[in-house]
Amino acid sequence: MQIDFAQSEASTLGIEWEIALVDAQSADLRSVAQEVLDGIKLQDGLGIDDEHPRVTQELLSNTVELVTGVHHEVASARAELSETLAEVRRITDPLGVELYSAGSHPFAPPELQPVTDKERYATLIDRTQWWGRQMVIYGVHVHVGLDHSAKALPIVDGLINYQPHLLALSASSPFWSGNDTGYASQRSLMFQQLPTGGLPFHFDQWSEYEKYVADMVHTGVVDEINEIRWDVRPVPRFGTVEMRICDGLTSIREVAAVAAFTQCLVADMSAQLDAGRHIPVMSNWFRVENKWRAARYGLDAIIILDSAGNEKLVTEHLADELTRLAPVAKRLGCEQELADVWRIVTEGAGYQRQRAVAAAHDGDLREVVLQNTRRLRMED
């Protein structure tokens, strides 16, 4: 199977942001995505059967996904997200629906959430059964353009080296079906139960990746390449590498911060490859352990840095990396957004805020959701 990698301008980016629809009073999930999408299409002069370019459906009918176009700078992508969010609110506000963004909803029973009426989603649930019905989860994905297909697989490996950093920053799913799981990110461990979910495999050559995809299609594991749902993956039709590690983030500022960090990392790795250097490949057992540590401990995780097994507190290594990437951010025009990465550390990640709110309200998880929606509205 030949898989062509589209031409793309280096370091351009696009963002996908999954957002839950919740009742403004009860804080429970509301399965009104179709009504919201129909309203937005009508608002923008589109037909009901047309696809909206910036708001799309997801697996569950309590979810919409905000999608940006291609941008050179994080600031313009952030501005587009803000405009789209305002457009969605013009539909959701009259419905008594608030917008909620975190890795999971803290108390909604997963088995009661209706699935979007599309054949591919029905097929997924039929195959995955109980695990598929647990996917009441929300994330943030960032695409970054590459100027050559030869860079795609090394940069996938490189971004996996930073999985614990990105996951710790975004971790926001400590509660599941009304219980505190003890984890910072329940979502990341839940999602990897799906076929082709989780950590990517390492390939030395593009032909090996093509062989993998061909095997998956031939054996019926997937019907399309986009059903390979790795935490980081190449996206040949866009000419990008897609970072899919992050839990849902509670504000546009946080989304922009993670997007800037991702863009800077990819741009830096691309420059290293241009200079003839190699991207280190972490041992698979260390990659698995790093993901688990970040999911379990969040910003308190001690992570493995290299195949020699050297370790460091994730926030200490993150501080080093933000300093190292500062010149890259200046060149890309995302200095402020990259600086906001450290603001997440100092103000606390989503899982820390959620637990603090629950503790302050005698374990009331409804208040956890409502605080989240207020924060998202305040920082639109």
Image: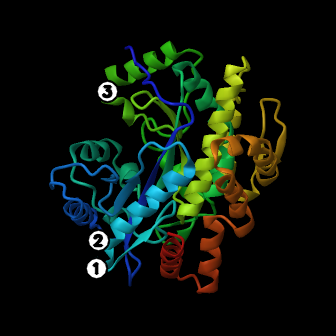
How many neighbours does mark 3 have within 10 angstroms: few (below 14), some (14-19), or many (20 or more)? Answer: few
The three-letter amino acid code for the residue at tag 2 is Ile
Q: Earlier in the sequence, mark 3 or mark 1?
A: 1
Residue at the image position 56 percent from the left and 46 percent from the top: 73
Q: Nearer the viewer, mark 3 or mark 1?
A: 1
Residue at the image position 64 percent from the left and 28 percent from the top: 270
The three-letter amino acid code for the residue at tag 3 is Gly
Nearer to me, 350 or 251? 251
35 up-or-down from 289: above or below: below
Q: Nearer the viewer, mark 3 or mark 2?
A: 2
Distance in Å between CA atoms under marks 3 and 1: 44 Å
Judge from the rendering whether residue 37 lies leftward or rightward of residue 78; answer left or right. Answer: left
Quadrant of residue 283 within the rendered picture: top right
| Residue receiving disc 2 | 91
| Residue receiving disc 1 | 94
Residue 162 visible (yes or no): yes
Secondary structure category for the residue under label 2: helix
323 up-or-down from 375: above or below: above
| Residue receiving disc 3 | 220
Residue 315 on image: x %, y %: 78, 54
289 up-or-down from 57: above or below: above
Secondary structure category for the residue under label 3: loop
**Which quarter of the image is occupied by the N terminus?**
top left
Distance in Å between CA atoms under marks 1 and 2: 6 Å
Distance in Å between CA atoms under marks 3 and 2: 40 Å
Judge from the rendering whether residue 291 lies leftward or rightward of residue 104; answer left or right. Answer: right
How many neighbours does mark 2 have within 10 angstroms: few (below 14), some (14-19), or many (20 or more)? Answer: some
Secondary structure category for the residue under label 1: helix
Residue 251 on image: x %, y %: 54, 65
Q: Earlier in the sequence, mark 3 or mark 2?
A: 2
Residue at the image position 26 percent from the left and 65 percent from the top: 36
